[in-house]
Amino acid sequence: MRTTVFCTPIVTPFLRWIAALIMRLIGWKAVGKEIENPRFVLIGAPHTSNWDFPLMLLVVLELRLQVFWMGKHTLFRFPFGWLMKWLGGIPINRSKSHNVVNDTVRLFRENANLVILVPPEGTRKKVTAWKSGFYHIANNAGVPILMGFVDASRKEGGLADFFYPTGDLEADTQKIRSFYADKKGIRPENS
């Protein structure tokens, strides 16, 4: 995979220190621990605000993960496309089917260590159903799903538990969503 903010020599250690400092200054706490040999799909919820993105960057830097995240392709337009890619972004055109699941499964086959962050809601707006791409990627690649979260009521963001897909999308999604039942987004009206 390519060089990102999470693995740039000299720059990344400095940014980790800055991330930890900013988290303390804004009163937020990164929850979780460094994960050795990471290979999983990371989901992040609730996704309710534009502030989720910089908060996610701070948390991931502080917890020393190297993450690639999926975002709508319009975030990658000139002149900031290079920056979004350096921040770990993978552009996704949501208006068409582009075999994103199959392409991501292939990336897992080709890379011993890989973390792909997918917001299951697919948007910051209020939704009644999550998109299932994250689940199909994890299930088809044979990797677990790590539940990442934002909880504005506690001012915490971080990593919780691994979930191992069974192949039963409906039952597994209910179990995963139950973890998020008490998590409050930055904009709770969008939860």
Image (tube, rainbow, N blue to C red):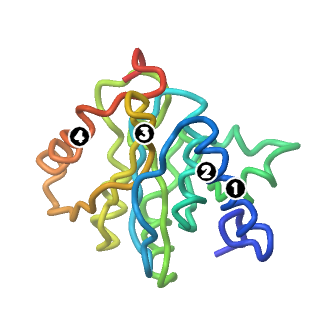
Q: Label 1: few (<14), some or many (≥20) within 10 Å?
A: some
Q: Is residue 97 above or below residue 107?
A: above
Quarter of the rendering containing residue 168 = bottom left
The type of residue carrying mark 4 is Arg
Viewport quadrant of the N terminus? bottom right
- Calculate the distance from the C-alpha at mark 2 to the C-alpha at mark 3: 12 Å
**In the visual, does 23 lie left or right of 32?**
right
- Calculate the distance from the C-alpha at mark 1 to the C-alpha at mark 3: 19 Å
Q: Are circles 2 and 1 on residues that touch, CB within 8 Å? A: yes
Q: Is residue 81 above or below residue 60?
A: above
Q: Earlier in the sequence, mark 3 or mark 4?
A: 3
SS of the residue at dot 3?
A: strand
Q: Position of residue 38 (x, y in %)?
A: 44, 75
Q: Position of residue 178 (x, y in %)?
A: 18, 39
Q: Earlier in the sequence, mark 2 or mark 1?
A: 2
Q: Residue at x 77, y 76 (%)?
A: 9
- Calculate the distance from the C-alpha at mark 3 to the C-alpha at mark 4: 14 Å
Q: Residue furthest top?
A: 189
- Residue 57 has which mark? 2
- Residue 150 has which mark? 3
Q: How many marks?
A: 4
Identify the residue under disc 1: 87
Q: Residue at x 32, y 33 (%)?
A: 183
Viewport quadrant of the C terminus? top left
- The mark closer to the camera, 4 or 2, is 2
**In the visual, does 163 lie left or right of 22?**
left
Q: Position of residue 35 (x, y in %)?
A: 42, 73
Identify the residue under disc 4: 177
Q: Are circles 3 and 4 on residues that touch, CB within 8 Å? A: no
